[in-house]
Structures are given as C-alpha cells and as structure tokens.
Image (cartoon, rainbow, N blue to C red):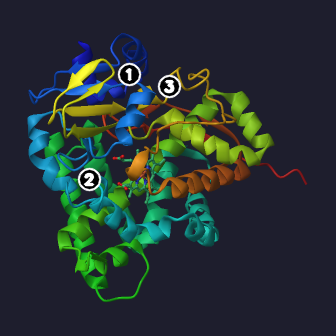
Amino acid sequence: MTVDDQLNDPAFFATGEHYRLFDTMRVKDPVYWTHSPDGRGYWSVFRHADVKTILNEPTLYSSEREGVAPVVDVEMAAIVREAWGVGKNVAMIDPPRHTEFRKVIAAPFLPKALADGEARTKILIGEIFDQLPKHGEIDLVTDLAVRIPMAVICDIMNIPSTDWDEMLDWGKMAIGGTDPEYQQGTAAETISRGFRLLYDYSDRRASERRGCPFSDPLSLLANARVKDQPLTPAEVAHNAVQVILAGFETTRNAFSGGVLALLEHPEQMALLREDRKLLRLAAEEFVRWSDPVISLMRTVTADTELGDKQIREGERVMLWFPSANRDEAVFDRPYDFDITRHPNLHLGFGAGPHFCLGGPLAKLEIRLAMEELLERYDGIEITGPVLRVQSTFVGGLKHLPVRLKPHVATH
Ligand code: HEM
C-alpha cells in the first residue's frame, strides 16, 4: 500500500500504524502532496509548527471555502457540503462572521457556567455508573464512554433523556459512517442519513423554542440576532448539530483512549490513584495521547509557501493531529504516556479562532468520570479485543471490553 493509499484509507487508522507512518513523514517530507481518489489531491501537513501556523491564519487557510471535514472521494464530496452546513456552521465560517456566530453559543461553555453546573454534571455521570451491571463485565466504550458526554451535552441542550439513544445512533452514523459497523448503505449514504436525522430533530426542537427565554444553546440559537438579523432556520439547525456532535463524538474517544492508556501503563494508573489532583493534567494527556480529532482540512485562499513547498490558491491542506501531537520537536519523549506532562502543548483542541469551544467541558467530564471510576472500582482488566473506529476524521476506540472489580468493604 502506498503512503497516499494509507492516508486516504479509514481502515488504516484503525490499525494504529499511522503513528509510525507519521514519524517517518515528519522527517522525510513534512508537507507532502497526497493524491486522493477524488483526483484533486491535498497537502498533508505533519509537523506541529506547520499545523499550528495554519490554525492561526484563518484568512489564508479558510474553513469556509470547502469546510473542515476531510473529503477525499467523489461520493463523499457530493453530500458533505450539504450535510455539514459549510458557511452556516460556526466551525466552517471564517472570521469576522465566525466571531459573531461563536458569541451566540459560547455562554453555556464558559468556565463560570461550567463551575456552576459541576454538581449537576457529577450527578448525571454518577447515574450512568449506577446503571452498569453489578457483575462488572462491560464494554467501556459503549456502556460508559459514549453515554457520559451524550448525557452531559443533551442535558446542556435541554434535550429529553427519552431521545438520547436515538441521538447516539445518529451521531455514530454521521461521524463514524466510514466504519462498516455503523454503516447503513455506503459510507456517504450513512453520513448523509445521520446528519439529516440530527438536522431534522434540531430544526424541530429549535422551532419549539423560538420566543422562549431559555439559556440552553438551542434556544440561544433559535432567538439570536447576528448583525441585527435572526439566524436562518438552516443556520440554527447546523450549529445545533455541530454542538451536539462536537460535544460527544470527541470526548468519548479522549476518555476511553485515556483509560486504555492507563491500563497499558499501570505505573501511571497507580500515580493517579495516589494523587487525584493529577486528574487535571491527566485530562490534557488523555487528549494528546488519544487524538480524538485525527484530521481537519483547510483551503488556501492565496498562493503561499509552507515548509519548502509552494502552495497554490484553491489547494487543500490536511492537518494530521496524531502527527503534530507526537512531534519530537515539541514533546519530550512523545511516546511516553505521562499524566504529569507539563506544559502539554498538544493541538488536540485546535488553536486560533476556532479553538475548541467545549475544551473546558470535555476536561471536566473526563475528570469527573475518572474520579467516579477510581472511586467505585479497585481494578479494571481488559477481557477481549480492543477495536478502533475506521475513520480518517474523528476516531478512537469503538470497543473496550473490561471487567470492573468493585471496592471490597474492609469493615
Ligand atoms: C476531548 C474532546 C474534544 C476534542 C478533542 C475537540 C476538538 C476540537 C477541535 C480540534 C476543534 C477545532 C476545529 C477547527 O479548527 O476547525 C474543535 C472545535 C469545536 N468544538 Fe471541540 N473538541 C472536544 C470536545 C468538545 C465539546 C465537549 C464541545 C461541546 C460544546 C465541543 C464543541 C466545539 C465547537 C462548537 C467547536 C467549533 C468552534 C469554532 O469553530 O469556533 N468540543 N473541537
């Protein structure tokens, strides 16, 4: 398989072999022209410094021209613009309009709002742990890691718990549609269907909230004015879908990937059990280590130079986060999983104007979920095959079968 075939193949990223490929490419050809099945090709960007530069220059590297989701085949290109709402969704709008859209949804995710809601988030997470079977044989991904962020983001969005299971299924289709396990038809059909169902749902809920004085993001969107104009129904729904998907499809991977890393590095688990204050630093290392966002795309708006390459207006760049986050130019011993790593300059939450709005929420969820896990269980052991999602975009574990051993009361 050629390098180009590997980079275009969702199944390759489920093998974990991409880290080795990236190590080679950072040295050999850090800005690499990659042929893609749609015939257009793109520049693969592997180094931390180049990825960071691109994220910080939104005028030169646009999120809006074609969106940020990697689109490398023809079938996918036809649906993705429509599905993601390029030009309407905060993540796919360039400044200065982007700044106005971001303001609309920011309030519930600011540290003060999260601190006020922390007790409620803890209760929600506790309830999910309460539902685990007493025998302790679980799939840590499907029973815990996907449910926690789903419950938290739906609660913030004021989406009733009777709808959460459906949201989970639709989210898996929208984001994991390149994985055969989640497919209904082709990858493109699956992704398109997942987005359509989420969009219709959000559109329905938003119209119920027009004129209501609630402060959840869906109501904020439904009643917002940007430059004195209300958002269009499509802008409202696409942004709601963005928040819902960003809220749970990434955090699940950071939490489950972090737990797996702790199981594979028992000395780090012991350190964390000894000193729970390390959880804040550990949450950052979970994100660096697990790389929930594998790649993002940008389109170049004027001829420029990157590394030693000439890039032309209209060409696309693909930012490879697992590569940037293991770049030895920035990280000491990048292949050590180290929950005391500080500073931890990973780009897992992005950088620049589109820097993840939900980063503090994701870290809060990881910290509370880990506290709960350590509090309730003495031991965790892997009992079956660990499987990763087939995706070049947002990925991580899809199954992590474990046995949880509850604390035995000593008196
Ligand atoms: C570990 C979990 C998470 C990771 C790794 C992650 C990663 C990212 C990344 C890399 C970006 C930048 C996208 C770009 O530059 O094009 C981003 C943006 C965003 N994230 Fe997250 N995210 C996580 C959790 C969350 C959560 C819990 C929310 C819930 C609100 C969220 C909401 C958003 C939104 C709304 C944006 C778009 C911001 C903008 O364009 O201004 N994310 N995220």
The residue lying toward the viewer, choosing from 147 and 245, is 245
The residue lying toward the viewer, choosing from 2 and 128, is 2
Secondary structure beneath dot 2 equals helix
Mark 2 residue's CB less than 8 Å from ligand 1: yes
- Say few, some or many: other residues with alpha carbon within 10 Å of mark 3 (under 14 / 14 to 19 / 20 or more): many
Secondary structure beneath dot 1 equals helix
Q: Is residue 83 above or below residue 278?
A: below
Asked if labels 3 and 1 touch by Cβ distance under 8 angstroms, the answer is: no
Comparing labels 2 and 3, the label whose residue is closer to the camera: 2
Of mark 2 and mark 3, the one earlier in the sequence is: 2
x, y percent for residue 113: 56, 70
Circle 3 residue: 326
x, y percent for residue 24: 40, 12
x, y percent for residue 259: 58, 39
The residue lying toward the viewer, choosing from 359 and 150, is 359
x, y percent for residue 283: 60, 45
Q: For the N terminus, which image quadrant?
A: top left
Of mark 1 and mark 3, the one earlier in the sequence is: 1
Disc 1/disc 2 C-alpha distance (Å): 27 Å
Of mark 1 and mark 2, the one earlier in the sequence is: 1
Query: Which residue: 61% across, 20% down?
Result: 333
Which disc, if any, is residue 92? 2
Comparing labels 1 and 2, the label whose residue is closer to the camera: 2
Circle 1 residue: 18
- Give the amino acid type for the residue marked by disc 1 in the picture: His
Secondary structure beneath dot 3 equals loop
Comparing labels 1 and 3, the label whose residue is closer to the camera: 3
- Give the amino acid type for the residue marked by disc 3 in the picture: Arg
| Residue 308 in the figure: left or right of residue 84 | right
Q: Using the rendered image of the protein, determine whether residue 59 is visible from the camera's viewpoint.
A: yes
